[in-house]
Image: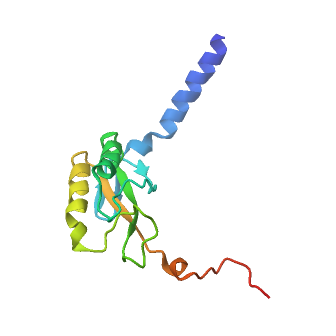
Amino acid sequence: MRKIQDKFEIGFRHAESMYDEIFEPIKIGKKESKNRVIFPPLSTNFGREDGHLSELFIKHYETRAKGGVGLLIVENSCVSYPEGKHGAYEPRIDSWDFYEDWRTIAKRLKKYDSLISVELTHQGWGKKGVNFLSEKKK
């Protein structure tokens, strides 16, 4: 039994040293992230129906920043309303009406030295009923 435990510990120490760089700072353009841990954009449906950011939405990202994530990419955010919106609770970033929401989330993440980015989306041709991926009908 001891041999298995020894092999596990040796393997763990090796893996630990292989991935040390993930916790080192990295420059992204002019910004520096405290580490290389990135939280990708995942749709939560925590936004409000009117496109404003709810407290739950902000807390969701703030919790990840508090946990040590270096860069958080906020989920798909509508850049053109109403034609570009494709989710009932999709956050909006197409108007100054939403400025205070985005300012709030940025300030909260900055408390934990985390960077923020936003996935900008537009439904595009899908809203028009065009489907270039379907087979042509004869």
Q: Position of residue 119 (x, y in %)?
A: 41, 65
Pick out the residue farthest to the right.
138
The picture places residue 46, in percent across and down from the top left corner, at 38, 53
Q: Is residue 134 above or below residue 47?
A: below
Task: Kindly identify the residue that appears in the image at 58 percent across and 28 percent down.
Answer: 11
* Residue 82 left/right relative to 126: left
Q: Which residue is pictured at 32% across the width and 65% down the height?
A: 50
Say which of 60 and 50 sits in front: 50
**Residue found farthest to the bottom:** 138
31 or 103: nearer the viewer? 103
Residue 71 vs 96, above or below: the answer is above
Q: In the drawing, does residue 94 fall left or right of residue 87?
A: left
- Above-or-below relation of 7 to 99: above
Residue at the (42%, 76%) spot, across then down: 84
Q: In which quadrant of the rendered view does residue 82 lie?
A: bottom left
Which quadrant would residue 77 be assigned to in this image?
bottom left
Which quadrant would the N terminus be assigned to in this image? top right
Number of numbered discs on residues: 0
> At which x and y percent is residue 64?
35, 44
Q: Quadrant of the C terminus?
A: bottom right
Establish if 108 lies above or below 121: above
Which residue, as the protein is rendered here, is positioned at the far top?
1
Report the colour scheme: rainbow
Query: Is 72 in front, or is 26?
Result: 72
**Residue at image location 48% in from the left, 35% down from the top:** 17
Query: On the picture, is 11 further left or further right than 43?
Result: right
Looking at the picture, how far across and down is residue 42, in whole percent?
46, 55
